[in-house]
Image (tube, helix red, strand yellow):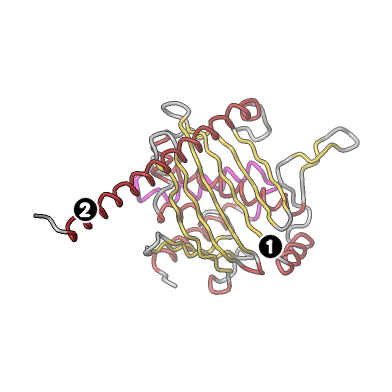
Amino acid sequence: MNGPPQRGARAIAVLARLALACLLGLAALSAAAGGGELRSRYGELREQLRDNNFHRPLYIVSSQDGDTLRGDIYAVLDHPFAEVGGALKEPADWCDILILPFNTKYCRAAPGQSGASLSVRIGRRSDQPVQEAFRLEFALRPVAAAADYFESRLDAGSGPMGTRDYRIVVAAVPLDARRTFMHLSYSYGFGALGRLAMQAYLATAGAGKVGFSVAGRDAGGEPVLIGGVRGAIERNVMRYYLAIDAHLASLSAPPGQRLEKRIGAWFDASERYPRQLREMDRASYFAMKRQESRRQQTMIE
């Protein structure tokens, strides 16, 4: 005859299964909602994706809300949905992506009890030693991996110069058998020190640089591209988008050839927008990224 301990254990097991079912149900509802919103956004942006100055199906927007900057890119990728989700899931893939922009000096993935983390170093100069570069510790958080919706997030609570709440979010839905619609969002917050650092950058290395959004028209009717801090966030989110696209393109090559294909694809794509993204010549970029990629395979902080 079963006594109270056995009945209590069965009750706990039943409650645990119910709790798990509720969590799975909420996750499914969240994925369905996220996928529906992203498909609606595709419908709203269909014309902008088809006719723009990027020469690819892409739309970019930025915003500043108080002390938070955010840049968003919506793009159609010429890759199947399953391939996109698989290539943006593993921590090592994210390091292959994040190392491509010119100012990322190092990325190392590490497992953890609450999920994977990425140790990233961001430099102010192309030749800056990695030990002097700013450190960001990202937590990789898978949000959804359904058959028709993918979402993953990178979060860092603090950054250099008083910046904080860094977040990179990638979400995607399939359009057809070979195309995927992706939303990439990049944001961070800043305080007084961060504001001063940004002002110094815009007065020196960032002087004259612009973003991609049209802020208005000049006297001759020509578009005036947005500058300042919103121009800077647009340049950053574009660099990450091009890195994701280059990583996806490299997967068709044999493993030993993927690095060269990634860095070549990223550099060539960035050269389409020289006013915003040009920082160095091809040979310098290739030499730097080969060295940094070798280092991140061997160096452990």
Is residue 267 magenta-colored? yes
Residue 277 visible in the shown view: no
Q: Position of residue 276 (x, y in %)?
A: 69, 48
**Which stretch is magenta?**
254-279
- Residue 136: where, in percent of width, then height? 54, 65
| Amino acid type of the residue tagged 2 in the rendering | Arg
| Secondary structure under the numbered disc 1 in the rendered image | loop
Identify which residue, 79 or 146, lies in the foreground.
146
The three-letter code of the residue at mark 1 reads: Phe
Residue 10 numbered mark, or none: 2
Q: Is residue 37 magenta?
A: no
Q: Mark 1 highlights which residue?
A: 190
Which quarter of the figure has residue 121?
bottom right
| Image position of 203 (left or right of 181) | right
Kindly report which numbered mark, 1 or 2, lies closer to the viewer in this rendering.
Answer: 2
Residue at 77% over, 42% down: 225
Q: Secondary structure at mark 2?
A: helix
Point 14% across, 58% down: residue:
3
Figure quadrant of residue 272: top right
Q: Is residue 115 among what the camera can see?
A: yes
Prevailing secondary structure of the magenta residues: helix
Q: CA distance from mark 1 to mark 2?
A: 51 Å
* Residue drawn 74% across the image and 64% down it: 195
Residue 290 image label? none
- Quarter containing the C terminus: bottom left
Q: Are marks 1 and 2 in contact (CB under 8 Å)?
A: no
